[in-house]
Image: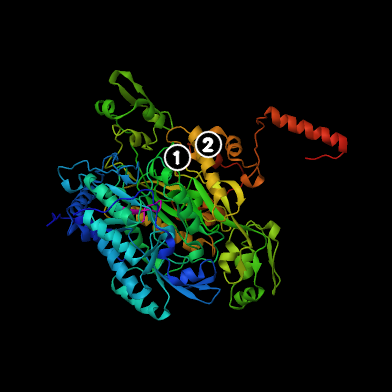
C-alpha cells in the first residue's frame, strides 16, 4: 500500500465545480508509490509556498538526446517515491485525434512503468507522462515505439510540431494542417531527437488567421493558412442572416478593419483589393462567406515567450506560399532558415533574436526570399541604411536606362 | 518479462487512423458550423453529413484511470473516437444525433464540465507549477482550479462580448501562452537571488552565467571564484538560476503573482497583441489565491459590462484607453506599470490626447 498523507490544503481544491487536479493525483496516489509521494510533496509546497524540484538532469534513451526531461526532488529522503520523477514526452498525432484503443495502450504502458499521472497535453503539444525512474526509460521507449509511438522534442532541438483541427473539422482551413504537420515532423526526425541547435525551434500550423494553435505567438516558425482572390459570397445566405435578426451593418460592416464592405439592404459588396483577410466577417457569417479559391499559407518567424529580452510575435517572412504535397518548398525553406540560425546564433538564442541582432537582410538573402512590403508594418523611420556596392551598381544601371528611355522607374 | 524490440525515429502515428469515418469522408469539405449549446456544436459538411462535438473541460493533469473512463464514454457514444483541443479540453465526437443527449447526461452525472464554446471563458492554458517544475514560483494547477471554480458560469453558461482566453504561467519563462492572452496570471520573483559561492565553483560556468543576465547585473567575483550581482540592476527574471543552480531565487514569502491583460493571437478585426501588466504583485495565498481570483473577476466583469459585442478584452481597452481601464477597474497605477525594459520607448505616450 502506498503511503497516505494528510493533505488538508489540497483537499480544499477537491471542492468546487471545475474538475479537480487533486482528485486526479489522489486516484494515482491510492495505488502508486510515486504518485503518493508526489501528493505529499505538493501538500508540503502548499504549506511552505515553495517548490522542491531540482534542475533537470541529463537522462534519456539510447541514441536520443531529448524526449525525456530529468526531474529530481530536492528532498528525496523525505519523499523517496519522487527521488526520480522524470517526464516522458510522446509526439502526439496531428490535431490531437485519438481512438480509445490508442489511448488505452498508452495508459497500460504508463501504469506499468510510471506514476499514472499525465498531461493531456503539454504546452508544445506532446502527450506528457509525468513521473518515472531512470531505469524504466529504456523499457518505456521500447514498449511505446514497438506500438508505433515516438518521443517528442526537448532541449535545443526541433520541438514537436503541432497544428489546429484544420480540414478534419473546420470549414475555414485553407491548408491541410494535419498532413503538413505530420510531414514536417517526419522530415525533421533527426533534428527533433538529437539537439544540435543554439536553442529550441518550434513549428505551429494554423489553418486560418483565427490561429487556434497560437502559432503567431508560440512558434519560431508560424505557418498560417490564407488565400488570394475574392471572398465567396452566398447572397441568399447573407439575406437569411439579416432576416433572422443579425445586425450586418453594426456587427460586420462597421467592424471590418479595412472598411472594405458595404450593405445596401439586399446585397453585400466586398472591395477585395482592400480586404486584409482578418476572418472577422467569415467567422460571423459562416454560412454566407467563404475564403477565396487560391489557397496557401503565410510563413512568419520568431515568436517566443519573454525570456530573456522580451516576448516576440512572429514576423511575416513569406507572405504567400503554396502548400501542396509533398511540401518540398516548405521543407527546404525550414532547412535554410534553421541553417542560417545555426550558423549565426549564440547559445540559447532563438531565431527571432538572431534576426534582430544580425539583421533581416542577411536572413532573407540566405533563405532566398525577396523584400516585400507585406513583411513590415511600415518602412524604416531612421536615416541609417546600408548599401552594398552591388546595390549602388543596380541603381546606377537603372538610372542609365532611364536616361536612354526618358522614363523614370521608381 | 521481456520488452519488445525498440524502433527509433518513426515519428508520431499517422493521424488518419484516428479520424472518425465521417471525418475521413468529409475531410476538407465542411460547409459551416453552428453552436447548439455552451458546450455543443455541429459541423455540417457539403455532403449534408453532420458531426457533433461535445466539449468538456479537463484539469490537463489526468490520471490514467480518468483517461480510461473518458475512453469508455467515447466507446459508448462516439464509436471510440475523441480529440483534445489546443486548450486541453476533451471533445467527444458524435455521429449519431440520438446519442447526443444521453452522452451529455452521462457526462453531467459523472461530474464533467460541459462548455467552453463560443463567447465564453475556455479552459486556461497553464504550466506545471509546484507539481513538477524547478523554476515555479507558484502552483499553476491550483490557480487554474480556483479561477475556474469562480468563473464557472462563464464556462458552462453565461455569454461575454467575445471569447476570453485565460492563461497561467508559474514563472516568467511562460510555458503557457500568458504573453498573448485576454487575462492571465504570471508568477514573479521579487527578490535579488543569492549566490552560493561554494556551489558555484562545482556547478556553474562563469561566462554562461554572466551572459545569461539581460541587464548586465552579474560580474565575476575573483575572490570567491564565483559571481556577484549588482542588486539595483536585477529585475528578478531568474535566467541566471536557469543556467546556474547555485544562484537560487525562490523565496516563499516574496514570490507571488502578477496579472496581465489584453493579449490575443487571432487576427480578427485587429492584429495579434501582447498582454500588458496591470497588477504587478499579489502574494501567493495557497490553496485558493483569493486576492488574485478577485482581481481576475473584477477585470472580467468590468469588461463584460463595458465592452461592445465582439470586442476582445484588448480591443475594448484600446478603444477606451488604458487610463480609462485603470479608472473603471479602480486598479492602482504604479512605477511598475511604466516599462523600463526592452520595449519601453514604444509604450510612452506621444500625444496630447488622453482622457481624465
- The magenta segment: A121-128
Measuring from the top left, give residue A13's x and y in whole percent.
26, 59
Q: Is residue B42 magenta?
A: no
User: Can you see residue B273?
Assistant: no
State the residue in front, B186 or A162: A162
Label 2 – label 1 distance at C-alpha: 40 Å
Left or right: residue A90 compared with residue A81: right
Which residue does the numbered mark 1 point to in the structure image? Answer: B335
Q: Is residue A125 magenta?
A: yes
Measuring from the top left, give residue A204's x and y in whole percent.
48, 52
Which residue does the numbered mark 2 point to in the structure image? Answer: A340
Q: Please report the residue visible at 26 percent of the width from the left and 56 percent of the height from the top.
A: A117
> Circle 2 marks a residue in which chain?
A
Asked where in the image residue B87 lies, by quadrant, the reply is bottom left
Residue sticking out furthest to the bottom: B98
- Mark 1 surroundings within 10 Å by alpha-carbon count, few (fewer than 14), some (14 through 19), many (20 or more): few
Amino acid at each position: 500500500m502506498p503511503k497516505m498523507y494528510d493533505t488538508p490544503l489540497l483537499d480544499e481544491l477537491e471542492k468546487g465545480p471545475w474538475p479537480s487536479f487533486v482528485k486526479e493525483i489522489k486516484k494515482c496516489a491510492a495505488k502508486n508509490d510515486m504518485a503518493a509521494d508526489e501528493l505529499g510533496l505538493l501538500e508540503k509546497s502548499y504549506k511552505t509556498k515553495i517548490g522542491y524540484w531540482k534542475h533537470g538532469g541529463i537522462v534519456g534513451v539510447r541514441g536520443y538526446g531529448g524526449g525525456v526531461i530529468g526531474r529530481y526532488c530536492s528532498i528525496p529522503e523525505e519523499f523517496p517515491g519522487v527521488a526520480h520523477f522524470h517526464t516522458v514526452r510522446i509526439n502526439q498525432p496531428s490535431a490531437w485525434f485519438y481512438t480509445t484503443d490508442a489511448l488505452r495502450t498508452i495508459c497500460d504502458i504508463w501504469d506499468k512503468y510510471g506514476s499514472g499521472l499525465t498531461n493531456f497535453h503539454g504546452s508544445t503539444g506532446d502527450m506528457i507522462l509525468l513521473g518515472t525512474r531512470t531505469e524504466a526509460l529504456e523499457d518505456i521507449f521500447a514498449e511505446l515505439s514497438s506500438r508505433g509511438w515516438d518521443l517528442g522534442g526537448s532541449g535545443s532541438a526541433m520541438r514537436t510540431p503541432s497544428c489546429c483541427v484544420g480540414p478534419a473539422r473546420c470549414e475555414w482551413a485553407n491548408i491541410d494542417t494535419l498532413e503538413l504537420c505530420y510531414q514536417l515532423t517526419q522530415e525533421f526526425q533527426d533534428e527533433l531527437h538529437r539537439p544540435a541547435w543554439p536553442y529550441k525551434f518550434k513549428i505551429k500550423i494554423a489553418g486560418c488567421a483565427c490561429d487556434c494553435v497560437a502559432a503567431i505567438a508560440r512558434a519560431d516558425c508560424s505557418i498560417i493558412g490564407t488565400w488570394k482572390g475574392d471572398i465567396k459570397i452566398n447572397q441568399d445566405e447573407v439575406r437569411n442572416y439579416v432576416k433572422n435578426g443579425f445586425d450586418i451593418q453594426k456587427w460586420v460592416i462597421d467592424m471590418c478593419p479595412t472598411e472594405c464592405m458595404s450593405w445596401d439592404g439586399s446585397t453585400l459588396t466586398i472591395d477585395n483589393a482592400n480586404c486584409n483577410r482578418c476572418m472577422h466577417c467569415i467567422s460571423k457569417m459562416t454560412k454566407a462567406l467563404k475564403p477565396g479559391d487560391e489557397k496557401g499559407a503565410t510563413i512568419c518567424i520568431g515568436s517566443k515567450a519573454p525570456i530573456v529580452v522580451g516576448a516576440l510575435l512572429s514576423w511575416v517572412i513569406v507572405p504567400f506560399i503554396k502548400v501542396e504535397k509533398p511540401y518540398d518548398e516548405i521543407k527546404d525553406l525550414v532547412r535554410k532558415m534553421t541553417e542560417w540560425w545555426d550558423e549565426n546564433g549564440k547559445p540559447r538564442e532563438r531565431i527571432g533574436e538572431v534576426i534582430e541582432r544580425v539583421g533581416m537582410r542577411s536572413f532573407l538573402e540566405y533563405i532566398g526570399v525577396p523584400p516585400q512590403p507585406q513583411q513590415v508594418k511600415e518602412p524604416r523611420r531612421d536615416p541609417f541604411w546600408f548599401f552594398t556596392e552591388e546595390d549602388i551598381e543596380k541603381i546606377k544601371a537603372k538610372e542609365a536606362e532611364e536616361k536612354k528611355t526618358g522614363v523614370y522607374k521608381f | 518479462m521481456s520488452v519488445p524490440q525498440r524502433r527509433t525515429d518513426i515519428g508520431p502515428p499517422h493521424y488518419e487512423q484516428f479520424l472518425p469515418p465521417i471525418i475521413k469522408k468529409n475531410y476538407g469539405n465542411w460547409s459551416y458550423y453552428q453552436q447548439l449549446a455552451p458546450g455543443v456544436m455541429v459541423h455540417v459538411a457539403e455532403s449534408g453529413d453532420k458531426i457533433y462535438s461535445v466539449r468538456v473541460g479537463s484539469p490537463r493533469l489526468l490520471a490514467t484511470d480518468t483517461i480510461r473512463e473518458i475512453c469508455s464514454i467515447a466507446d459508448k457514444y462516439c464509436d471510440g473516437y475523441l480529440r483534445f483541443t489546443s486548450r486541453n479540453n476533451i471533445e467527444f465526437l458524435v455521429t449519431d444525433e440520438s446519442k447526443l443527449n444521453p452522452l451529455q447526461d452521462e457526462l453531467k452525472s459523472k461530474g464533467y464540465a460541459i462548455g467552453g464554446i463560443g463567447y465564453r471563458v475556455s479552459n486556461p492554458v497553464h504550466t506545471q507549477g509546484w507539481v513538477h517544475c524547478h523554476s515555479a514560483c507558484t502552483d499553476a494547477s491550483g490557480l487554474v482550479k480556483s479561477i475556474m471554480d469562480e468563473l464557472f458560469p462563464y464556462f458552462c453558461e453565461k455569454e461575454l462580448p467575445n471569447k476570453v482566453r485565460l492563461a497561467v504561467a508559474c514563472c516568467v519563462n511562460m510555458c503557457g501562452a500568458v504573453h498573448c492572452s485576454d487575462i492571465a496570471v504570471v508568477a514573479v520573483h521579487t527578490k535579488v537571488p543569492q549566490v552560493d559561492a561554494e556551489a558555484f565553483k562545482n556547478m556553474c560556468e562563469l561566462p554562461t552565467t554572466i551572459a545569461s543576465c539581460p541587464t548586465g547585473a552579474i560580474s565575476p567575483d575573483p575572490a570567491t571564484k564565483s559571481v556577484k550581482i549588482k542588486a539595483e540592476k536585477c529585475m528578478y527574471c531568474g535566467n541566471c538560476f536557469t543556467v546556474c543552480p547555485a544562484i537560487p531565487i525562490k523565496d516563499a514569502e516574496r514570490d507571488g503573482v502578477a496579472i496581465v491583460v489584453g493579449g490575443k493571437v487571432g487576427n480578427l478585426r485587429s492584429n495579434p497583441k501582447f498582454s500588458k501588466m496591470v497588477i504587478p504583485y499579489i502574494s501567493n495565498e495557497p490553496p485558493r489565491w483569493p486576492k488574485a481570483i478577485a482581481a481576475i473577476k473584477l477585470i472580467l466583469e468590468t469588461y463584460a459590462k463595458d465592452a461592445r459585442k465582439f470586442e476582445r478584452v484588448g480591443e475594448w481597452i484600446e478603444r477606451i484607453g488604458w487610463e480609462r481601464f485603470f479608472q473603471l477597474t479602480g486598479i492602482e497605477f504604479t512605477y511598475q506599470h511604466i516599462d523600463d525594459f526592452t520595449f519601453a520607448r514604444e509604450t510612452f505616450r506621444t500625444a496630447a490626447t488622453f482622457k481624465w
